[in-house]
Amino acid sequence: MPVGQAFVPVTRADKGGSVVGNRGSRMSSEKQASSPADRLTSVDALRGFDMFWIIGGGEIVRGLFKALSLPVSNPLRHQFEHAEWIGFTAWDLIMPLFLFIVGTSIPLSFAKRLERGDTKRQIYLHVVRRIVILFVLGMVAQGNLLAFDLSKLHIYCNTLQAIACGYLIASIAVLNVNIAWQGAITAGLLVLYWLLMMLVPVPGHGAGMLTPHGNLAMYVDEIILRGFRDGTTYTWILSSLTFAATVLLGVMSGHLLRSKTSPQRKALLLLASGIAGVMLGLVTSIWFPIIKHIWTSSFVLFSAGLSYLLLALFYWLTDMLGYRKWAFGFVVIGMNAILVYMVTRLIDFADIVHALIGFVTAHIGVWNGVVEPTLGFAIVWLALFLMYRKRIFVKI
């Protein structure tokens, strides 16, 4: 199917009433596309909200729980730790929300590229380039690539690599089939993974085993990655099927956001999709439990449902009602999400703060667990703010 049939770009008129999107307007279009004013605030803010917890927010909240030592903080503190195996906590939402937002951005990004005159081949080249960069960055962030020691190298073990695989499958779907088929592919991936995990026997364990070391996804990783595994109970290769499903569910939200539907209807549909996703996740978990480590189909549905609910909230407040000031801090982070993710994976700014003023924070007792990560986060945010002011946005 031609790309124009699978994905129809949205055109945009400039101040003089002409349509931006031909090759002669490419430079102007690229400058405008990189401007925060030309983007959906809700998407950038939600991306920044997600990254906030990764780059310091989680550590700050954990420090607060420890410092306050209130009875109510114990169950809340549990929400800032991953579920040991079966189950779900708020902290388990961070990675699937990241993948979901990547999916949300695909229809919006591809529309701009088609609008400015890019061919299908050019978009594919960009997709391949982005996948390679994401995969390498994943090995740098968590795979010990910079140690230059094969015995320590982990090939596939990071969120960015999960994004790369999901982005590849989702991009192919968006560029070649219509929305209905994209939905069918999403459902097919979820069902296929479910059937494989439950019906294919694992040597020494049998079929349908969902224990940390007896499941099919782990067996596949051990066979293919061997010594290049990261040694955890997280699975990657076979789980790429459901990584892609998470991204594709995000794609559906992107299609909705760029549609001509009224803002009120968009917000309601996002809300309804969120409720449906949560309910489907809970129902299917009866047969296929919610397990983040192996990215089960029920986990995909449940986490995507929560992602839809968050997107509905952010869209309703920022893009529909126009209340954007409260989200500015998140937008600053979201505009350079990959950059700040990598920087904070390689540099611990809380440790830098401790080295500089640890002799002072040592006198505030348990509160140093709040002050040091807060100051570390402040350094990172201020650097991002300066980049935002200068319109420096690092993209891959």
Image (cartoon, grey):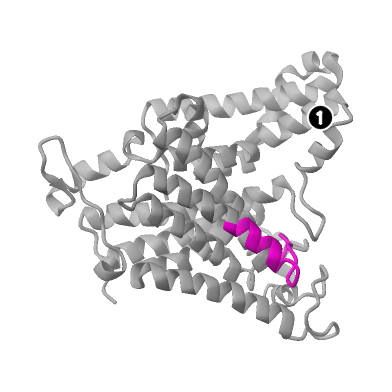
The percent coordinates of residue 350 (x first, y second) are 70, 29
**Is 45 situated left or right of 215 in this image?**
left
Q: Is 277 part of what is drawn in magenta?
A: yes
- Residue 200, by quadrant, is bottom right
**Is 62 situated left or right of 258 in this image?**
right
Can residue 159 be seen from the camera position used here? no
Identity of the amino acid at label 1?
Answer: Phe
- Residue 176, by quadrant, is bottom left
Q: Is 288 part of what is drawn in magenta?
A: yes
Can residue 136 be seen from the camera position used here? yes
**Towards the viewer: 287 or 295:** 287
**Towards the viewer: 204 or 348:** 204
Is disc 1 surrounded by few (<14), some (14 to 19) or many (20+) residues within 10 Å?
A: some
State the residue at coordinates (26%, 44%).
Answer: 30
The percent coordinates of residue 254 (x first, y second) are 41, 54
The percent coordinates of residue 396 (x first, y second) are 42, 50
Disc 1 is placed on an element classified as helix
Mark 1 — residue?
65
Q: Which residues are magenta?
A: 276-294
> Quarter of the image containing the N terminus?
bottom left
The percent coordinates of residue 168 (x first, y second) are 46, 66
Position above or below: 58 against 200: above
Position above or below: 333 against 202: above
**Is 6 situated left or right of 213 in this image?**
left
- Residue 111, by quadrant, is bottom left
State the residue at coordinates (68%, 24%).
Answer: 374
State the residue at coordinates (83%, 15%).
Answer: 364
State the residue at coordinates (63%, 47%).
Answer: 94
Position above or below: 194 against 81: below
